[in-house]
Amino acid sequence: MKNKRAEFSSTFGVIAAAAGSAVGLGNIWKFPYITGVYGGAAFLFVYLGFILAIGLPVMLSEFIIGRKSRKNAFGAFKKLAPKSLWQFVGILGVGAAFMILAFYGVVAGWSIEYMFSAAMDGFSDKSPDQLGSMFGTFIESPLKPVFFQLIFMVLTGAIVIVGIKDGIEKNVKILMPILVVIIIVLDIRAITLPGAKEGLKFLFHPDFSKLTGEGVLSALGHAFFSLSLGMGTLITYGSYIDNKNNLLRTAVQVTTADTMIAILAGVAIFPAVFAFGIEPSSGPGLVFITLPNVFQQMPGGYIFSILFFLLLTVAALTSSISILEVVVAYFHEELKMKRKVATVFATILIALLGIICSLSMGIFKDYLFFDLNFFDLMDWISANLLLPLGGLFISLFIGWKFGRKKVRAEIEKGGSISELFLSTFMFLVKIVAPIAIAIVFLSGIGLLKI
Ligand code: PFF
């Protein structure tokens, strides 16, 4: 059939692709760094609460919307709720995709650079301070980070051009498990370092008095970011899932894998942060400064460091393709561009925005918006503003517009669910998620004092 839409070829393919989207720089770079900034365990616990009460229900909602409509993020709402304002949720998502991929590509570029540094033995014999200034000098320089960011964007565009099935599925299946093994090896090394205990305490022993409204908003924003929610990525992927798939099971598996990997990354990093006397709140460089210290202190560190940054880049790629896919599916299906043209066009636009993000670390660092450089601004607006808003509308849509009966019918295409589960889910998407998101959002941006 000529017009049949692409579908993932197996259940495992679906999980691999969705987990590939969820697991990425968000888990290994961003989670540890913002956990450090917002004070450790208390942030982690709030984050886990959001994953369970909001993230999981919203993920299931996105899969339902995607599979039912078989459309891109914008077209899905147009089809399920014709001539209504719901379509704007899709537009919001396309906007978020632009912003996220712009800064995401920059960090992925850092990972490529670190892979080469590792290969040239660039970390050995350096003190923690020297590794810190090496990172600082690198991200501030005008050429190298831009160069690697562009390479990453070209790779992303190239995979998306090949298409969903061949481009996405195959890559993820083999490489992700290897990444997990490497992180576990790093965990073992990190927790056996002298002074590691402090780090585990920082990560798991909560002091809720340290939490701020902004920290709670960031935990919510990161729950969305890490699970690839709130901008239609999993609506778009859901549209490629066949009717036999058990959507609930898939959502649970993806959420579990994503959360486990974030925690494993935290366990690799915080013990080392304390062992080497690095500031936990040192920001976006945390992982890039901490892990090279760990590699230095372990047998086979040379090989492990190359492999780690290689696989981090691959994990970033399986996420970046899912972000680009949101824009491409929209350009292709709604604006009627040829898929290839849409991909090239979107990649170029986002890469240009990414160059500004990269330069905002160095030569443009004095241009601040609300006290943030352009990189942080893109991150903040997308993760803390657009994704929670998108999540709010998605849960309202499923809870109030789509409704219980259709939810049941869509989930049960791939396996039965109990009345109790259905009631809990509907309560979460109708009431809990919208109210919680609204409160966290308003207090995080300072409009509500609690
Ligand atoms: N979830 C990805 C990560 O944790 O690295 C990032 C991401 C992918 C965010 C897709 C949003 C998205 F739609």
Image (cartoon, rainbow, N blue to C red):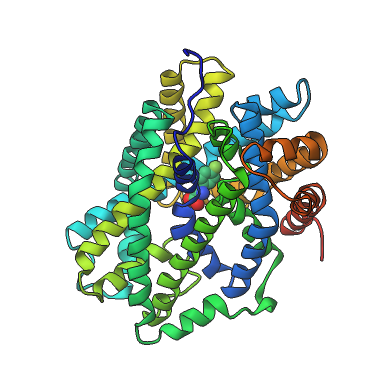
Tell me where residue 221 appears, x and y as whole percent.
Answer: 63, 54
Residue 313 visible? The answer is no
Query: Horizontal placement of 361 versus 82: left or right?
Result: left
Q: Residue at x 44, y 33 (%)?
A: 9
Quadrant of residue 265 within the rendered picture: bottom left
Between 109 and 44, the residue placed more toward the observer is: 44
Q: In this view, which residue lies farthest toward the top? A: 2
Query: Horizontal placement of 324 versus 382: left or right?
Result: left
Query: Horizontal placement of 217 versus 371: left or right?
Result: right
Tell me where residue 218 appears, x and y as whole percent.
Answer: 63, 59
Quadrant of residue 402 within the rendered picture: top right
Between 74 and 182, the residue placed more toward the observer is: 182
Assign the C terminus to one quadrant of the image: bottom right
Between 362 and 185, the residue placed more toward the observer is: 185
Q: Residue at x 36, y 55 (%)?
A: 177
User: How many discs mark residues in the rendered view?
Assistant: 0
Vertical order, 5 against 278 (above or below):
above
Residue 219 visible? The answer is yes
Tell me where residue 195 appears, x and y as whole percent.
Answer: 40, 86
Q: Residue at x 33, y 70 (%)?
A: 185
